[in-house]
């Protein structure tokens, strides 16, 4: 090998940017830490701009395979024109073109530093970076055909990058023929930094003293990189993710991944994980899993439950709900086969269909639901699906559809009670409705409902008690200081838990006095904006739960009248607050000053 390129290769979120920051600090002559927005110590192999500049035309006019065909020559040109070692970041696996040439030319290569990380820690970090679910990331990590920037529908600023699956990516590099590869484990960068970084420096042929390496390590510490991003931003951060430098911890997967997610990763990649010390030869899939919840399900004899002022009869136990007495049944739930094609639907969504006083929902692998006339819900379970999963979707959209069919107004929000009056907090998903209700419950209020604020009008707007629990994600519970051990997840595999309200659940309807419209942003200011006149009506309509269903089931006029009456008799304010939930205490202080 006579090339001048040292590839800084890794699967995404394995420490590549951290290592590049170290390298930039090591190679620069100026004192003090390097700017993370100018990591001049390395190129990026997938940069479209580099290819366009070298080719003399827009590579966007080429097909993806035609671009790949040019890449070996691009790297040979970079190597030939370089006067010294060129460190180049690359996320591509080490693959070959149809004619047998390596995509990353051997003739351009001096060697490769391969940055390796436990795939269990990669999954949540990659999900954060990509602003998508962990299950989606695991599917990508297990997909041998996975590639970055491979869509023909738009023009990314990076070239297509063949990732393969995680194991395939690792083996393609560490066992690559005809090139020298030095493996650097992310965990060793954290736990024995001097030995690890200095070893990589020596491999790359850089003559640096131990003191210089120590200084570069200090100036590129993960904590410093994170701090610099918070203060100055980072140009390589994904548009939708909160931060590029997330946690940087070893073993953080234990507090994030579900048992099922861990098993999916270990079963697929266990051989390679064992090879690099992420699980031992003695370990099997079970004992690399987090501790499982061993609490037995609470036995409940009653099959009738009180919900939003109604009595619901169920064929299965709903241990989370409040048992109801008497023979009255407002809504009957039963099992049965559902023939949804019998009906003429006004609207068909991805997973639902709706018509006059009818609503159908199909959740693949869990159940089908049919709601008719606001009085009957038929459930067709899928196979041996656990009741927990069936109930979760029942408690959400299905019950909301039944409430709409009964002429009630379901708004997307939670309701707290103080001095016998209801205070509603309306907002979109993840804006903080549940965590606000939980925080107020710890201070000055009881809780009437979470997720749904159900309104009816009897001379004044009344709100009705919903579920006697809060549903909080792991992160929200942590912010509130709530213990998760022994808590029941809303569904196996979700890091979302039931928190029973017990004595702080308000089980009687109350007048609705105030409504706060939640508007989070990333500024420091906390302000109230009164909503007046017709704007009150429009605001309420914006927060009708699944408003599309209202129209499709023919309840527009009823819901409009309910919104008009509610707007006339309530105070409505928009509250603007910082979206960092760690500042929850400041938000609650601000709210309490307004309504206490």
Image (tube, grey):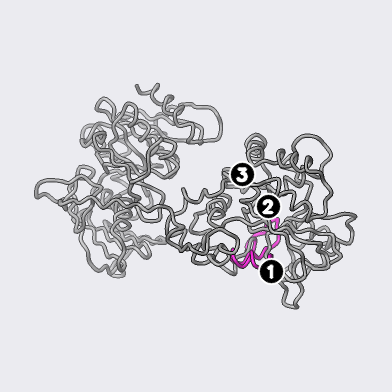
Are circles 2 and 1 on residues that touch, CB within 8 Å? no
**Where does label 2 land, which residue?**
16
Name which of mark 2 and mark 1 comes first in the sequence. 2
The vertical placement of 172 against 415, above or below, is below
- Residue 418 lies left or right of residue 300; in this view the side is right
Query: Can the viewer see residue 360?
Result: yes
CB under 8 Å between discs 1 and 3: no
501 vs 539, left or right, is left
Circle 3 sits on which residue?
245
Crowd band around label 3 with a 10 angstrom C-alpha radius: few (<14), some (14–19), many (20+) = many
Q: Position of residue 59 (x, y in %)?
A: 76, 63
- Residue at image location 65% in from the left, 47% down from the top: 192
Which residues are drawn in magenta?
149-175
Q: Quadrant of the C terminus?
A: top left
Residue 10: say if magenta.
no
Instruction: Return the residue nearer the eye: 324 or 410.
Output: 324
What is the spatial separation of the Cα atoms under label 2 and label 1, in whole angstroms?
Answer: 19 Å
**Mark seen at residue 175:** 1
Q: CA distance from mark 1 to mark 3?
A: 30 Å
- Disc 2 is placed on an element classified as helix
Q: Is residue 220 left or right of residue 79?
A: left
């Amino acid at each position: 090998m006579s090339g001048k390129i040292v590839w800084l290769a890794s699967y995404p979120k394995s420490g590549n940017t951290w290592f590049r920051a170290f390298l930039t600090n090591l190679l620069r002559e100026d004192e003090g830490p390097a700017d993370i927005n100018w990591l001049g110590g390395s190129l990026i192999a997938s940069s479209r701009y580099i290819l366009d500049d070298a080719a003399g035309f827009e590579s966007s006019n080429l097909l993806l395979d035609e671009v790949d065909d040019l890449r070996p020559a691009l790297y040979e040109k970079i190597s030939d024109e370089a006067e010294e070692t060129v460190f180049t970041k690359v996320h591509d696996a080490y693959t070959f073109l149809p004619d047998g040439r390596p995509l990353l030319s051997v003739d351009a290569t001096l060697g490769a530093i391969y940055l390796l990380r436990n795939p269990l820690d990669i999954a949540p970090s990659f999900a954060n970076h990509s602003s998508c679910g962990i299950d989606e990331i695991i599917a990508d990590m297990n997909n041998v055909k996975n590639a970055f920037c491979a869509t023909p529908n738009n023009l990314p600023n990076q070239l297509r990058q063949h990732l393969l699956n995680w194991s395939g990516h690792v083996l393609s590099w560490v066992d690559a023929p005809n090139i020298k590869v030095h493996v650097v484990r992310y965990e060793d960068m954290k736990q024995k930094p001097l030995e690890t970084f200095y070893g990589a420096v020596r491999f790359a042929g850089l003559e640096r003293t131990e003191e210089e390496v120590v200084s570069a390590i200090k100036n590129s510490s993960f904590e410093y990189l994170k701090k610099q991003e918070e203060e100055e931003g980072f140009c390589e951060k994904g548009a939708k993710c909160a931060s590029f430098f997330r946690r940087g911890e070893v073993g953080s997967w234990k507090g994030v991944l579900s048992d099922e997610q861990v098993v999916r990763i270990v079963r697929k990649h266990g051989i390679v994980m064992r090879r690099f010390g992420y699980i031992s030869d003695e370990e099997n899939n079970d004992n690399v899993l987090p501790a499982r919840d061993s609490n037995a399900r609470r036995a409940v004899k009653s099959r009738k439950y009180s919900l939003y002022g109604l009595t619901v009869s169920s064929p299965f136990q709903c241990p989370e709900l409040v048992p109801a007495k008497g023979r009255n049944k407002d809504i009957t739930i039963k099992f049965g086969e559902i023939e949804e094609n019998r009906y003429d639907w006004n609207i068909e969504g991805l997973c639902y269909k709706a018509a006059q006083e009818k609503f159908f929902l199909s959740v693949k692998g869990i159940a089908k639901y049919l709601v008719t006339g606001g009085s009957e819900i038929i459930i067709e379970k899928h196979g041996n699906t656990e009741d927990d999963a069936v109930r979760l979707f029942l408690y959400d959209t299905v019950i909301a559809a039944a409430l709409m069919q009964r002429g009630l107004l379901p708004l997307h929000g939670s309701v707290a009670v103080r001095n016998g009056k209801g205070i509603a907090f309306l907002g979109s998903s993840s804006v903080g409705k549940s965590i606000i209700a939980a925080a107020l419950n710890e201070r000055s209020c009881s809780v009437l409902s979470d997720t749904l604020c159900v309104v009816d009008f009897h001379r004044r707007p009344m709100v009705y008690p919903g579920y006697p629990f809060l549903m909080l994600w792991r992160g929200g519970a942590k912010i509130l200081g709530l213990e998760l051990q022994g808590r029941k997840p809303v569904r196996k595999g979700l890091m979302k838990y039931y928190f029973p309200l017990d004595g702080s659940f308000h089980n009687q309807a109350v007048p609705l006095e105030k409504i706060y419209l939640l508007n989070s942003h990333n500024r420091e200011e906390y302000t109230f904006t009164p909503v007046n006149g017709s704007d009150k009506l429009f605001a309420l309509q914006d927060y009708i739960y699944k408003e599309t269903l209202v129209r499709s089931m023919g309840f527009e006029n009823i819901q409009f009248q309910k919104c008009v009456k509610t707007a006339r008799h309530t105070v409505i304010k928009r509250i603007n607050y910082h979206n960092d939930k760690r500042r929850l205490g400041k938000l609650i202080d601000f709210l309490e000053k307004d309504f206490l």
